[in-house]
Image (spheres, rainbow, N blue to C red):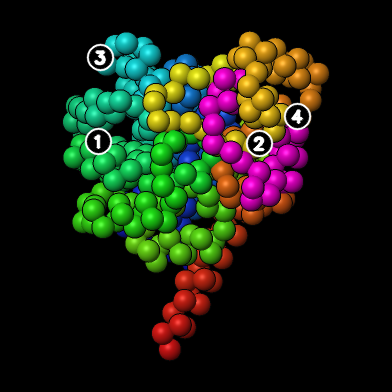
Amino acid sequence: MIPINTPLTKRLGIQTPIILAPMAFGDTPELVAAVSAAGGFGCLGAGFHSTVELKEKIQKIRSALKTAQGTPVPIGIGFIGWILDMTEVSDDPRLEAILDEVPVAIWFAFGADLGKYIDQVRAYDERHGRKTFIFVIVNSVDDARRAALKGVDALVVQGTEAGGHGGSESPPLFPLLQAVLREMKPGPLILAAGGISTGAQIAALLTMGADGVALGTRFLFTPESAYSPAMKDVLVKANLAATVRTLAYDDAGRTNFWPPKHDGRAISNQIMDDYNAGMSLEERLKLFDESAARGEKSRLIIWAGVGAGLTAEIKPASDVLVELHDEAVHKLRGAAGLLL
């Protein structure tokens, strides 16, 4: 692999500026380890997992990467702010317990006051003589300003094309990234996220000024992802119009605790049809549960971004990472020829 050198790759000691975004319902220790082992940087979604479960997952990753106990493990752990808030404690025990496992990075998203958790990480680092790398997802220029004031290391600029959850009023990635770059340079490192599925897109974003990219959906098309064979079968058949942003899938999954102005992007199916038909929540839940009991595909919850329509096969995560990187290198080299 010919390295792509950016401030992000230098800070994290990686060969390619491709980050596996944390996906609470889509990642696995095997997927995270595969991305980091191949030269990228894998992140594990904490979701609703307990501290014990998270520690077990981190130990699996540490073992796969052959990193000694007590040394930094080259991954990030992604926390959702409003889930941390549900503990109703000033110092969330999960943060310190996970920091004890020495992940290189922590990733925060979607909370009314992420600053208090950033402060906890910095206070822990000060006590332990460490410097944990902190990513924060931003869906607007205002989000970016607030995160930058807290001294985070990287802003993950997430456009509306992203799969899973994000800002319901987020602009498309390209104009949002341009706006944040104008506002924040110099400042924290800037990553682009949302609908990225090809090396050509990565090359374009790097030339715009991004220090790296964060991909989720593209890595769902791998044997290592947590999605079932039935879910992956739906993914490979998806087109560019296959996804929709809505809270209907959180209703069905009984996870509709999201703060205002947030929703999720998923593969549109009968769940959305039920919602659009004006059915009551009780009716929709009954149909969802019955469909799940029968093992039907028509009401599966499949979080995915717009970029799902650009991929049509399942490949090992390491192959996906190398292909994305090599295509980006090829496109970056080709762009230089435009000036000859």
Q: Is residue 31 visible?
A: no
Q: Which mark is residue 109?
A: none
Q: Secondary structure at mark 4?
A: loop
Q: Which residue is mark 1?
A: 130
Where are the magenta residues, as a range? 227-252
Q: Which residue is mark 2?
A: 268
Q: Which residue is mark 3?
A: 90
Q: Secondary structure at mark 1?
A: loop
Residue 86 lies in what quarter of the image? Answer: top left
Q: Residue at x 54, y 61 (%)?
A: 199
* Left or right: 222, with 329 as reference point: right
Tag 3: residue type?
Answer: Ser
Does 249 appear in magenta?
yes
| Nearer to us: label 4 or label 3 | 4
For disc 2, the neighbor class at 10 Å (few under 14, some 14 to 19, many from 20) is many
| Earlier residue among tags 1 and 4 | 1
Q: Which mark is residue 298?
A: 4
